[in-house]
Amino acid sequence: ELKPKPRKSLTELVQNFERWRSLLDGLPHTELAETVLEESGYTAMLQADKSAEAPGRLENLKELINALQEFENLAGFLEHVSLVMENTESRDADMVNIMTLHAAKGLEFDTVFLPGWEEGVFPNQRALDETGVAGLEEERRLAYVGLTRARKRAFVSFAANRRIYNQWQASIPSRFVAELPPEHLEQRSDAGLYGSYSAGHYGSLRETATAASGDSDWGWTPGQRLQRKRSPLIEGEITARDAEDVDYEIGQRIFHQKFGYGAIAAIDGNKLDIEFEKAGRKKVLASFVSAA
């Protein structure tokens, strides 16, 4: 026998299941999933959670909704998940483990992939807004955790443009990329994608930059690889001028190879807010543009 309070909660849950099931035929499955997350209180619970894992779990819920959009209905999605789980359980060979940086603590792998090293993604903008310097330091510690999970190779990657809430947004590399020791870097980049890398500002790295570690001491000559056991390295090639070499003013007309002509609306160090004539307002590094 349950006490009155848990009995009432359980009854309400069963009634909610029945009501949500009745909406299957008349409501798009993505909207139904959002409804379940909201009405069950699951999203609100994570929003009220102040732990370091909560923001990541909220992002996972958004990705769940995005994944549902690729299927015609909920049954198709569940069938796909079932097949994936069945294949996973039946394999004996080595496989890729996907996990958060928090879950990776204490583990080691020969090869590690670290995607999404962009400002606003990592470090997470919400963490910076809510906890300031403390949040930044926690994100920096997570960056260290990720890099040191690799026994042999670590691949650090970031996107020049990322689709967020159905809109393409220009991205700049994470400040953590710039904090890697420049004497241990060899760079390679598509011309004009990012300004050249130097200590204190963002690097000239292509959309997928490679970090690696080897078994020898550090050694470098042009065209060769930097190697050191369990030490991160980013491969790249310097191809563009430093942001410090340029001087722009608010209102100045500029040109960007991808976004075209625009005018500078605001300046923050080597980052420019630009109102482009055709692409709208975007934030880019000063080294991406030239005076028109």
Image (spheres, rainbow, N blue to C red):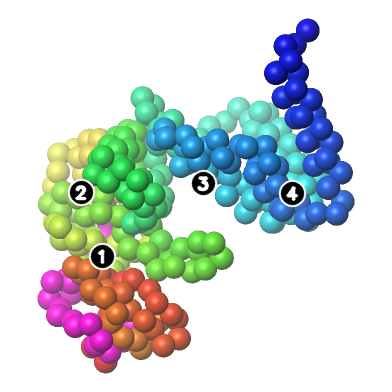
* Residue linked to disc 4: 32
Q: Is residue 129 left or right of residue 247?
A: right
**For the residue carrying disc 2, how many other residues have a C-alpha within 10 Å: few (<14), some (14-19), or many (20+)?**
some
* Residue linked to disc 2: 180
6 within the magenta span? no
Q: Which residues are magenta?
A: 234-256
Camera-side residue of 214 and 48:
48
| Mark before the other along the chain sequence, 2 or 1 | 2
Of tags 1 and 3, which is closer to the observer? 3
| Mark before the other along the chain sequence, 4 or 3 | 4
Say which mark, if any, is on residue 76.
none
The location of residue 209, given as percent across then percent down, is: 33, 56
* Residue linked to disc 3: 59
Confirm whether residue 98 shows in the render: no
Of tags 1 and 4, which is closer to the observer? 4
Looking at the rendered image, the quarter that the C terminus falls into is: bottom left
Looking at the rendered structure, the secondary structure element under dot 1 is loop
Looking at the rendered structure, the secondary structure element under dot 2 is loop
Q: Residue furthest top?
A: 1
Identity, as a three-letter code, of the amino acid under mark 1: Ser
Calculate the distance from the C-alpha at mark 4 to the C-alpha at mark 2.
Answer: 45 Å
